[in-house]
Image: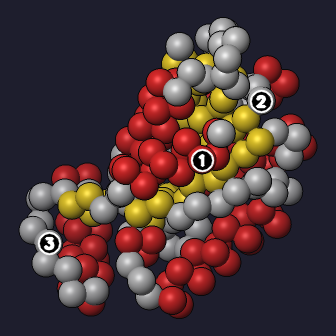
Amino acid sequence: MIHDNAGAGADRHPEGMNILVVYATTEGQTRRIARFCADHLHGAGHTVELLPAAEGAELDLARFEAAVLLASVHAGRYQPEIGTFASAHAKGLNRLRTLFLPVSLAAAGDDADELADLDRIATDFAAETGWTPGRVEQVAGAFRFTQYDFFKSWAMRWIAARKGEDVTPNEDREYTDWSALRALLADWAG
């Protein structure tokens, strides 16, 4: 059973873990990835609760064996609500099996400096929140031109051009490797 909010009770699945999937998103790709994670983990026999980070203030983590947190990188930081959630629940998260999936366009590339920066952002996040993820895996995101305003669309086209990407305004382009994500989740959940 997949729950979409903290208010719903989580049923225990006898052969699987009770897993919390928490996300913060800006244009929607991270929410899409979080939903994929929840669906895949549920299909693998786990009970899953899917929750936007902004709705997690009163959540009781004691009913979960594991948690997956997702957020996207914008201007070198994650959404504030994922930081608030991780800080508020750091002690409980540190007792669970956890996976942190930062989502970014830089993860789609092979620029060593950008990849090192993604690792630094995740390390800084752990230090700021007090939560030490059990595993961190960078996930490639998407250009979501259908969600951008004029200025962000222009900036994203400029970024794409710098990377040699040919993009069409008003057309989304996805870089998420769903097969690799499926394999990652299977490996992590055991």
**Left or right placement of residue 5 versus residue 159 in this view:** right
Which mark is on residue 65? 2
Compare residues 12 and 25 and report the one nearer the observer.
12
Q: Which mark is residue 167?
A: 3
Which one is closest to the eye, mark 2 or mark 3? Answer: 2
Tell me the residue at 55%/44% (across/down). 185
Viewer-proximal residue among 162 and 101? 101
Q: Position of residue 46 (x, y in %)?
A: 60, 23
Comes first in the chain, label 2 or label 3: 2
On the image, numbered disc 1 is attached to which residue?
187
Estimate the x, y position of residue 137 in percent, counting from the top left: 58, 61
**Picture colour scheme:** secondary structure
> Which of pointers 3 and 1 lies earlier in the amino acid sequence?
3
**Gap between marks 2 and 3, in whole Å?**
42 Å
Cα–Cα gap, marks 2 and 1: 16 Å
Amino acid on which disc 1 is placed: Asp
Query: Residue drawn 11% across and 59% down?
Result: 170
Q: Quadrant of residue 58?
A: top right
The disc labelled 2 sits on which kind of residue? Glu
Q: Position of residue 183 (x, y in %)?
A: 48, 49
First reached walking from the N terminus: tag 2 or tag 1: 2
| Circle nearer the viewer, 3 or 1 | 1
Give the left or right position of residue 122, taking residue 175 as reference. right
Distance CA(mark 3)–CA(mark 1) = 33 Å
Is residue 60 at all visible to an observer of this figure?
no
